[in-house]
Structures are given as C-alpha cells and as structure tokens.
C-alpha cells in the first residue's frame, strides 16, 4: 500500500485491532482467521458464512441497483 493513501475509517481498525487481539491471546503470528474474526466482530456479519449467491450479489450490487432503481444513476454512483 502506498504511504500517502488513506484507508477509510472502517477499514483502518482491522490491522490494529487484530494485532492487539493476537497479542492479548499470547500468539506471535497474525493469521487470516484472526483478521476475519475482528471484521466479524466489528460489522456483526459472519464473513465466512456468506453464500456464493450473496457474494455474487454484493460484488454486482451496483449493476443490480441500476436494474431496479430508475433514473437514479447519480445516487447509485455516489454510493460506490
């Protein structure tokens, strides 16, 4: 990651919170599952339990919104 690039506030908590949780647990290495656990705790959504169709819907959410929301291109663009 570039040093001058700033993460959104919701994304910037993950590395620090995960490192602190791992340190408290007595482990020396941060693993992928540790990061997923912290994200799940923060957003209160089980990250690994998302179904394939739900993942595809979220990945294609902008195009799905364009199909269902009429004449609101500017509003949809603002979300993404």
Image: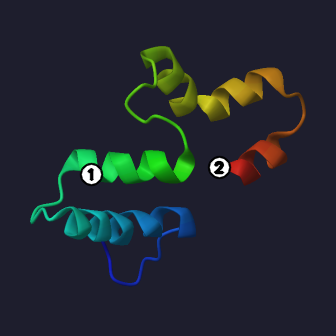
Q: Earlier in the sequence, mark 1 or mark 2?
A: 1
User: In the image as oriented, which residue stretches furthest toward the front?
Assistant: 25
Comparing labels 1 and 2, the label whose residue is closer to the camera: 1
The crowd level at tag 1 (other Cα within 10 Å; few <14, some 14-19, many 20+) is some
The structure residue drawn at horizontal position 31% and vertical position 53%, both measured from the top left corner, is 35
Lateral position of residue 24 relative to residue 13, left or right:
left
Query: Which percent across, then down, holds residue 49?
Result: 42, 25
Q: Quick check: 11 above or below 34?
A: below
User: In the image as oriented, which residue stretches furthest toward the top?
Assistant: 53
Residue highlighted by disc 1: 34
Q: Quick check: 59 above or below 18?
A: above
Question: Which quadrant of the structure image shows residue 72?
Answer: top right
Label number found at residue 16: none
Quadrant assignment for the N terminus: bottom left
The crowd level at tag 2 (other Cα within 10 Å; few <14, some 14-19, many 20+) is few
User: In the image as oriented, which residue stretches furthest toward the bottom?
Assistant: 4
Question: Which quadrant of the structure image shows residue 9?
Answer: bottom right
User: In the image as oriented, which residue stretches furthest toward the left?
Assistant: 28
Q: How is the image coloured?
A: rainbow
Label number found at residue 80: 2
Lateral position of residue 56 relative to residue 19, left or right:
right
Query: Which percent across, then down, holds residue 40?
Result: 45, 45
Dot 2 lies on which element?
A: loop
The structure residue drawn at horizontal position 68% and vertical position 24%, both measured from the top left corner, is 64
The structure residue drawn at horizontal position 32% and vertical position 63%, both measured from the top left corner, is 18
Query: Which percent across, then down, holds residue 25?
Result: 21, 61
Q: Quick check: 46 above or below 79?
A: above
Question: Of residues 48 and 4, which is closer to you in this image?
Answer: 48
């Amino acid at each position: 990651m570039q040093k001058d690039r700033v993460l959104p506030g919701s994304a910037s908590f993950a590395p620090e919170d995960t490192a602190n949780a791992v340190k408290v647990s007595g482990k020396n290495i941060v693993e992928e599952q540790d990061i997923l656990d912290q994200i799940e705790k923060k957003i209160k959504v089980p990250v690994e339990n998302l179904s394939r169709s739900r993942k595809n819907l979220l990945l294609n959410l902008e195009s799905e919104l364009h199909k269902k929301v009429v004449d609101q291109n500017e509003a949809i663009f603002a979300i993404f």
